[in-house]
Amino acid sequence: MKQEVQLMKGNEAIAHAAIRYGVDGYFGYPITPQSEVLETLEALMPWETTGMVVLQAESEVASINMVYGGASTGKAVMTSSSSPGISLMQEGLSYIAAGELPALIVNVMRGGPGLGTIQPSQSDYFQATKGGGHGDYHYIVLAPSTVQEMADFVALGFDLAFKYRTPAMLLADGIVGQMMEKVVLPEQRPRRTDEQIARECPWAVTGRPEGRGPNVLTTLELDSARMEVNNHRYQATYRKIEENEVRYQEYFTDDAEYLFVAFGSIARICLKAIEDARQRGIKVGLLRPITLWPFPTKEIARLAQQVKGIMVVELNAGQMIEDVRLAVEGRVPVHHYGRMGGIVPNPQEVMDSLFANFPDADK
Amino acid sequence: MKPEDIKRSENKVYCKPELLNDTPMHYCPGCSHGVVHKLVSEVIKEMGAEHIAIGVAPVGCAVFAYSYIDIDWIEAAHGRAPAVATGAKRLNPSRLVFTYQGDGDLAAIGTAETIHAANRGENIAIIFINNAIYGMTGGQMAPTTLEGQVTATTPYGRRVDLNGYPLKISNLLAQLPGTCYVTRQAVHTPASVRKAKAAIRKAFENSLAGHGTSVVEIVSTCNSGWKMSPAKSNEWMVEHMFPEYPLGDLKNDTER
């Protein structure tokens, strides 16, 4: 079958992909640079076709709690926002993680801290991968680098979220959200029926049918011994996710003497720099983490035995570099090149950063 | 009448509501929560709605409401119950979705969620316990605390120049076109209990009929927080709370 190729923004692709996945509900609040997600959904009126609910909430605090309420009933529910809005959602995210609820949260990052800028950034890496809100928790973090991945990771995020009963975050940046690219949208899937939800999500708060006891979705447990058991259960899920769901892509690593590690849009700029460098005979490769949590620790450790040095390139002051250094365990030098405040470096600047930190690379 | 006659079912005048389970309640003796829990249980059962009911519990004394009433529950973060209920109801329009919240939860930290859920006319019912104090955390000032009322954080009495005025949030909600029914009740006498039960039933029926948001405020006692006996608390409530929060319907617009 011939696939239909369309041209659209990353944010628009998320909206289309959500409808086609059969998402039950979207709750969101406008914030640049991701407002097109809500705008596109409102324009497409999916409540007329698939029955998907779309609601503009009064705040990000309300959005994430609407997600919490909807997800509690076993429905596929999502929200999207950008950095300052995601900060407001941290309380709700902690509850959703503790409630072991599947949900998809999209963060199209902009520069911070504070109100910051509306230009692209990757400065919410720590917040996304280390929990972000209160308590010991993680959730799956997917980092798209293309508009196609913006569309594809909606389905991937929901599939993983339901598989492990955990929230998943699509951690994009303003570049991937705003740029237009070719995309092939997934096939339309039907929304799950209530019968299917009752079967697949026996924990769901749906109204107690005859013959089953009450389902109570709570994150409160005043008995310390039982609360520790809950925590051990969360951690066991996280270990399982770390074991099974690490995703990454390698480029030119077979013979690489130097390695870039970068995610999202900046990984594509690194790739361009690498292609230029390869033409000059410089053996440099790229590892692009697709899951930022779980992090490709083993893969980076393996490459650290092969290369002479690693450059971590990010649109922040140096966040993912901490996870890279933990993976490398001092085997080779790891340096950082980062731009902040919405500045995006060009391929030449990226390559210059390699030469500045590893002069031997420029033979 | 002999004891065995008393036990005969035709002579039964009262029994524990079927949906109220045997978990010992953590509420203080004399607290209004127990009575309101009983009414909610009775109304749901009498409506035959126990299989479609989804309760949203607050943070506050009623945080454990889910431990006592045998229906499905979601425990919300502090103040967020109306947003949580919005998500649950929008995605499950056939369900009876209600929140059960205290004054701190509904009228302080959750004011935005309360006002906007009501302004959207979400088809949910809100049971609002107003005892003018934070019970769970040990008797601190609430938005509904009366002027001059002594609490743990207003040890010399609430001063309006420092702390503002008692917030009549139900009056505010009654102004919104999204609400169909806003009423203020109490549960300190058998007559008031019966009226409160009828109000809860009307609120639940409204939300199933899709009339909009219903709010049942119950002016309540907190004898532990107020540091009075249960009997004295009822007297104090009648004398001081009722003038500030008069009982009765603030809005009854379900025929539209």
Image: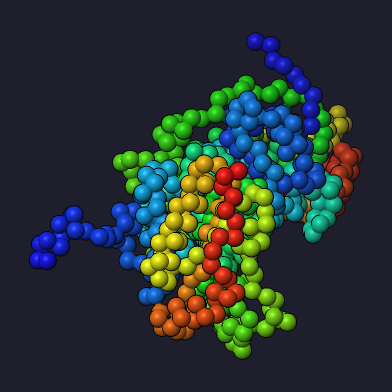
Residue at the image position 48 percent from the left and 57 percent from the top: B199
- Which residue: 73% across, 82% down? B161
Quadrant where the N terminus of chain B sits is bottom left
Q: Is B50 displayed left or right of B200 in the figure?
A: left
> Looking at this view, is A81 or A233 the one in front?
A81
Tell me if residue A340 can be seen: no
Q: Residue furthest top?
A: A1
Instruction: Answer with the quarter of the image where residue B42 lies.
Output: bottom left
Q: Position of residue B194 (x, y in %)?
A: 40, 61
Residue A267 in picture, x, y percent from top left: 77, 38
| Image position of A24 with respect to B212: above or below | above
Residue at x 47%, y 74% (from the top left corner): B221
| Colour scheme shown | rainbow
Q: Which image quarter: residue B230?
A: bottom left
Is residue A110 visible in this depiction of the protein?
Answer: yes
Closer-to-camera residue (A105/A206): A206
Q: Nearer the viewer, residue A232 or A80?
A: A80
Quarter containing the C terminus of chain B: top right
Picture mark count: 0
Q: Relative to B200, say whether A211 is above or below.
A: above
Q: Position of residue A304 (x, y in %)?
A: 67, 44
Residue at 72% across, 16% down: A4
